[in-house]
Image (cartoon, rainbow, N blue to C red):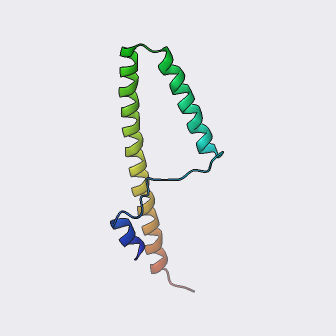
Amino acid sequence: MSILDKLWCGNIAPHERDFKKGGAYAELLGYIVRHEEALQKRMNDEEKEIFEKFTECTNEMYGIAEREAFVRGFTIGARIIIEVMNTEII
């Protein structure tokens, strides 16, 4: 099965990623979770609701940005391939 077939069939999910335990991503995620939990403990119900809406909007914005970055990267990669294929070898 080609990579395009795998992408079409959903066998490749560019938005999903594994991260190394103990790596920078995992460390940052731990900080985020810890700080969010600390904030939640100090908030009343109305503040929690506002914070939840803020988090949902932020996550949606990050999703849009990731999708746009993927499309840009894919487009640049395709343009590089086209240029390489059209270049005469000396």
**On screen, 36 above or below 14?**
above
Q: Nearer the viewer, residue 1 or 67?
A: 1
Placement of the C terminus among the 4 image quadrants: bottom right
Question: Measured from the top left, where is residue 22 in percent x and y?
Answer: 66, 45
Residue most extreme to the right: 22
Q: Quadrant of residue 89?
A: bottom right
Question: Measured from the top left, where is residue 84 in percent x and y?
Answer: 49, 76
**On screen, 6 above or below 25?**
below
Instruction: State the count of labels.
Output: 0
Question: Measured from the top left, where is residue 28 in percent x and y?
Answer: 59, 38
Identity of the residue drawn at 59% across and 44% down:
25
Q: Nearer the viewer, residue 32 or 73?
A: 32
Identity of the residue drawn at 59% across and 32% down:
31
Describe residue 4's horizontal placement relative to residue 88 as left or right: left
Residue most extreme to the left: 8
Question: Measured from the top left, where is residue 21 in percent x and y?
Answer: 63, 47
Placement of the N terminus among the 4 image quadrants: bottom left
**On screen, 33 above or below 11?**
above
Identity of the residue drawn at 40% across and 16% down:
47
